[in-house]
Image (tube, grey):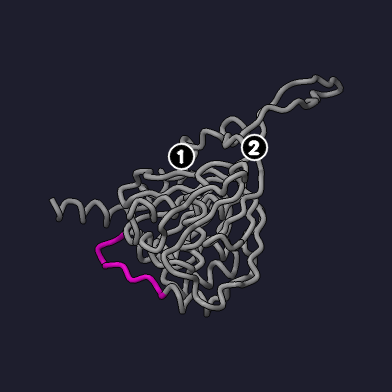
Amino acid sequence: MSQQPTRIKQLTRWHHARPQHVEDELVVEEPLEIRVNQESLIVVMRTPGHDFELAAGFLYTEGLIKSSDDIHIIAYCEDSEDNIVNVHLGTELQAGWQRNFHANASCGLCGKMTIESVKLQAPAITVGTDFYICPHSLYQLNARLREAQSVFERTGGLHAAGLFNENGELLIIREDIGRHNAVDKVIGQALLADMLPLERHILMVSGRASFEIVQKALFARLPIIVAVSAASTLAVALAQEGNLTLIGFMRGENMAVYSCPERIRAAGSCAREKIHQS
């Protein structure tokens, strides 16, 4: 099966009272079964592409593996038409991993983990006092993410997640029909590239900030999340518990900081710091 993220379909487009038959490019949504040591773990609805990163990121952000060293091989199962991925681990998963995994493109793994269980597996983030971001740098992230969303530009149908360094440079971008899938693909790529922990990086997502996205960021040790839209109450609560800076409503030069605002410095403070370092 093709790994292309889009397909051309026929549709009828209306303009005022006049219909027109046209071709349009639509986002692909297909199931992906993730297996661990040949045992089925979960089926997710995703946009094809970067499936190995999705599997690796999912396992890592669910606390099922600790590092890329736990992964021996990731491969498509034979005769699966690229819709079944098997992750071969060096050891068996710990007892009790058979939890109620169920995911779809819109809500991800709703309510599977509690704040207390996340805290046990992903302690609060501790970042040196020298790590901070100026508002001007944050205000540029949205435009840089948007410019890199090539499939969204053609279809208007995908979410995006981007990994930025502390200088605001976009390092990794992934698009998917599911917000959580896009984040798993970004973290999975960082995991497989031995970039973790991401203690001096920023995660930006194109939609809202949910509990699950904050959970995944904590596992990757990301200290800052920036979202285009709002944050949920559970996302804010988990961010506060995890000492993570959660930012929403990033529009132009406006943003709402829900937690840990001390990582954001006023423009004057940033300029004085740069002069002092030089």
Determine whether label 1 and label 2 are within 8 Å by CB.
no
Query: Which one is in front, 258 or 227?
Result: 227
In three-dimensional space, the C-alpha distance between marks 1 and 2, rounded to whole angstroms, equals: 22 Å
- The residue drawn where x is 53% and y is 41% is 49
- The residue drawn where x is 60% and y is 34% is 2
Secondary structure beneath dot 1 equals helix
The numbered disc on residue 27 is: 2
Tell me residue 68's x, y (percent).
38, 59
> Is residue 128 found inside the magenta-colored segment of the image?
yes
Q: Quadrant of residue 219?
A: bottom left
> Is residue 186 found inside the magenta-colored segment of the image?
no
Look at the picture and state if 111 lies above or below 55.
Answer: below
Total numbered labels: 2
- The residue drawn where x is 48% and y is 63% is 61
Q: State left or right for residue 203 relative to residue 267.
A: right
Q: State left or right for residue 200 relative to residue 261.
A: left
Q: Amino acid at mark 2?
A: Val
- The residue drawn where x is 52% and y is 33% is 150
Q: Amino acid at mark 1?
A: Ala
Residue placed under numbered mark 1 in the picture: 143
Residue projecting furthest to the left:
278
Tell me residue 67's x, y (percent).
38, 63
Q: Earlier in the sequence, mark 1 or mark 2?
A: 2
The numbered disc on residue 115 is: none
Query: Which one is in front, 56 or 253?
Result: 56
Mark 1, other Cα within 10 Å: few <14 / some 14–19 / many ≥20: few
Residue bounds of the magenta highlight:
123-132
Mark 2, other Cα within 10 Å: few <14 / some 14–19 / many ≥20: many
Tell me residue 211's x, y (percent).
56, 66
